[in-house]
Amino acid sequence: MTVPPLIVAPSILAADFAHLAAEVRAVEHAADWLHVDVMDNHFVPNLTIGLPVVQSLRAATELPFDVHLMIEDPRRWAPGYADAGAYNVTFHAEACDDPVALAKDLRSAGAKAGLAIDRDTPIEPYLDLLPSFDTLLIMTIKAGFGGQRFIPQLLDKVRAARRHVDSGHLELRIEVDGGIAADTIEQAAAAGADAFVAGTAVYGADDPAEAVRRLRALAERAATGV
Ligand code: DX5
Ligand code: ZN
């Protein structure tokens, strides 16, 4: 059996915002996706970047953008990120009353569609919606801030999603976000995640590209069980 390649997605939330293009280029040849956290100070208390920054950054790198929208009213804003060239646009289940309709809009705008599940949201009500999505992002912290402690209990949701995806033969990435680092990524991979967001663990390292390679090696080892 061939194990599908894992995705490592550095989160620029932990990068130096005064030098974003250089920070992105630092991981250009090591990372698979670039994770871009958009926060609106309403859905989460924090405020980060929005569409103009994503549009400018799009020209600065070849890396696919994995946009994580932590915003209210994603039906209004999410398609704009697809139009800006994002590879994957993920919005929160808690912020959207018709996730399937928005997934359809995102796919017609040329992006992959992602559904995010925050810390306190159960996964079960959403499992039947997964055929409409390309990625399922399971928070391993409470969404809103980088640098928080990984919550291992939340991997139960990853296990449930992995069982559902495999038994239904769905083509869906299961992504984990929050506190992913050298000491946590293996458990997340063993639980069935195959895409890993890492902010502090990448941009807090002396050599961000090397940190990405190290995380990937750990996840691969855990996923293949060797
Ligand atoms: C937080 C964001 C994360 C954040 C992760 O809500 O969604 O992507 O950047 O940061 P670390 O890896 O530092 O936990
Ligand atoms: Zn994120």
Image: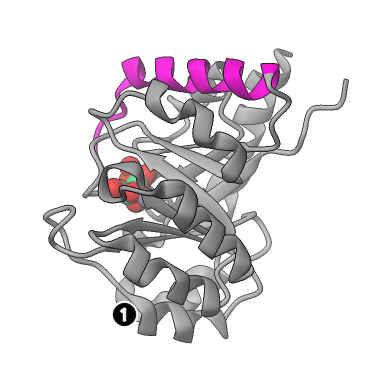
Residue identified by numbered label 1? 18
Magenta: main secondary structure: helix
Residue 6 falls in image quadrant: top right
144 in magenta: no
- Identify the residue shown where x is 25% and y is 44%: 143
Point out the image quarter for the N terminus.
top right
Whole-percent x, y for residue 145 in the image: 22, 49
Q: Amino acid at mark 1?
A: Ala
**Span of residues in magenta:** 147-167
Q: In this rendering, would 22 be left or right of 37? A: right
* Element carrying mark 1: helix
Asked if one can make out residue 56 in the rendered structure from this viewpoint, the answer is yes
Residue visible at 60% across and 61% down in the picture: 107
At which x and y percent is residue 73? 26, 62
Give the number of marks. Answer: 1
Foreground residue, 69 or 222? 69
- Disc 1: CA contacts within 10 A as few (<14), some (14-19) or many (>=20): few
Give the x, y percent position of residue 30: 65, 55
Q: Residue furthest right?
A: 1
* Residue at (74, 38) in percent of width and height: 5
Instruction: Answer whether residue 64 is visible to the viewer in this image.
Output: no
**Side (left or right) of 96 relative to 10:** left
Q: Residue at x 37, y 79 (%)?
A: 51
Name which quarter of the figure residue 225 lies in.
top right
- Indicate whether 25 appears above or below 183: below
Q: Quadrant of residue 4?
A: top right
Judge whether 144 appears above or below 129 on screen.
below
Figure quadrant of the C terminus = top right
